[in-house]
């Protein structure tokens, strides 16, 4: 996915260096920057044709000025042109409020980094349709085949985006993408920073990189492993999804060894989401479905074909109810 092109407006060279480094750490690019005068001065940077062309292509502004309201008034017309050139997001920050301690600096950097990560998704939403309903397909040993059967039986247009959490070595993720390419209407994709979970897609969780789902159906991808013994962690993904999407979340637990996912089934139900499992007798390994069933949170159990048929019925009913409410 293309990195965002950001414009930086700051009032010191130190801030410019600091923010440029932080932007690079999030995988984005600084396409334009200007060091504005300190409050009380009237000299502002001139804009040439090249500057205007770069500004016109920006995705967002990041502004870090000590007295931001007074500064915007003092610099007047030129700064107004910078911020009004196009209708793009503007992130306002004031790093001067952070004391000199390393702990405070780290907290400030982490907060701003999180805002930038969310910004990527917000910008991408302008060009993509987000899935309102997001479901996790959870599996381990023996999982790929029933997941494929389930997806092959689904029609397009249900308005759902899937996240596929399969316990697998990272080098086999490409094989899952290829497998899903033969699964009918649902396209397999790899998670990227700020990616939008779109309808009729299956995002395959990377075992080596933790992923969070935001409430606007966009992804934050971290350069760090999942917590716990399982990679990816189904429990961690479900807990995050339930918190972000609430009643628009769901999980189907397929064949697998172990108990990953069972603990967070309760959280999914607390948030009014759906918990389904593959019929244990149809699994290669039934440990994960049995662990989920033991929680007494399961709404439906069936073979891959039965799961697909019930899913179509469930989503058609849900979509019809939404349409009736909106009309």
Image: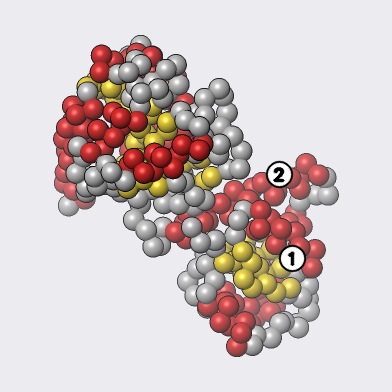
In the displayed structure image, the side of residue 318 where residue 140 appears, left or right: right
Residue 270, by quadrant, is top left
Residue tagged 1: 16
Answer yes or no: is residue 218 visible.
yes
Q: Is residue 264 above or below residue 76?
A: above
SS of the residue at dot 2?
helix
Viewer-side residue, 191 vs 172: 172
Badge 1: residue crowd in 10 Å (few <14, some 14–19, many ≥20) = some
In the displayed structure image, the side of residue 229 where residue 127 appears, left or right: left
User: Residue 260: image x %, image y %?
Assistant: 45, 21
Viewer-side residue, 239 vs 77: 239
User: Residue 21: image x %, image y %?
Assistant: 71, 58
- Outermost right residue: 100
Badge 2: residue crowd in 10 Å (few <14, some 14–19, many ≥20) = few
Which numbered mark, 1 or 2, is in the foreground of this view?
Answer: 1
Answer yes or no: is residue 274 visible.
no
User: Residue 232: image x %, image y %?
Assistant: 50, 31
In the displayed structure image, the side of residue 305 where residue 277 appears, left or right: right
Which residue is pictured at 76% across the width and 75% down the height?
Answer: 37
């Amino acid at each position: 996915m293309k990195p965002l092109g950001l414009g930086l407006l700051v009032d010191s060279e130190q801030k410019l260096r600091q923010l440029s480094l932080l932007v690079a750490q999030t995988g984005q690019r600084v396409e334009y920057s200007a060091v504005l005068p300190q409050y009380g001065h009237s000299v502002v940077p001139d804009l040439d044709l090249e500057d205007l062309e770069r500004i016109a292509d920006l995705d967002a502004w990041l502004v870090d000025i000590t007295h931001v309201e007074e500064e915007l008034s003092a610099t007047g017309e030129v700064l107004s042109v910078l911020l009004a050139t196009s209708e793009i997001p503007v992130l306002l920050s004031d790093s001067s409020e952070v004391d000199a301690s390393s702990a405070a600096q780290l907290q400030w950097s982490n907060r701003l980094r999180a805002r930038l990560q969310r910004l990527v998704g917000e910008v991408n939403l302008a060009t993509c349709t987000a899935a309102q309903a997001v479901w996790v397909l959870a599996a381990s040993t023996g999982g790929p085949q029933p997941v494929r059967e389930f997806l092959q039986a689904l029609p397009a247009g249900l308005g759902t985006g899937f996240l596929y959490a399969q316990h697998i070595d990272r080098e086999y993720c490409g094989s899952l993408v290829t497998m899903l390419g033969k699964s009918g209407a649902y396209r397999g994709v790899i998670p990227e920073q700020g990616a939008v979970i779109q309808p009729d897609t299956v995002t395959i969780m990377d075992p080596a990189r933790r992923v969070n789902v935001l409430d606007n159906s966009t992804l934050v991808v971290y350069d760090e492993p999942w917590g716990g013994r399982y990679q990816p962690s189904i429990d961690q993904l479900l807990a995050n999804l339930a918190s972000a999407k609430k009643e628009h979340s769901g999980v189907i637990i397929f064949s697998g060894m172990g108990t990953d996912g069972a603990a967070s089934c309760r959280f999914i139900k607390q948030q009014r989401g759906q918990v389904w499992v593959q019929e244990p007798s149809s699994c290669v390994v039934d440990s994960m479905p049995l662990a989920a069933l033991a929680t007494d949170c399961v709404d439906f159990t069936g073979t891959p074909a039965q799961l697909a048929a019930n899913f179509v019925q469930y989503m058609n009913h849900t979509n019809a109810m939404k349409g009736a409410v909106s009309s």
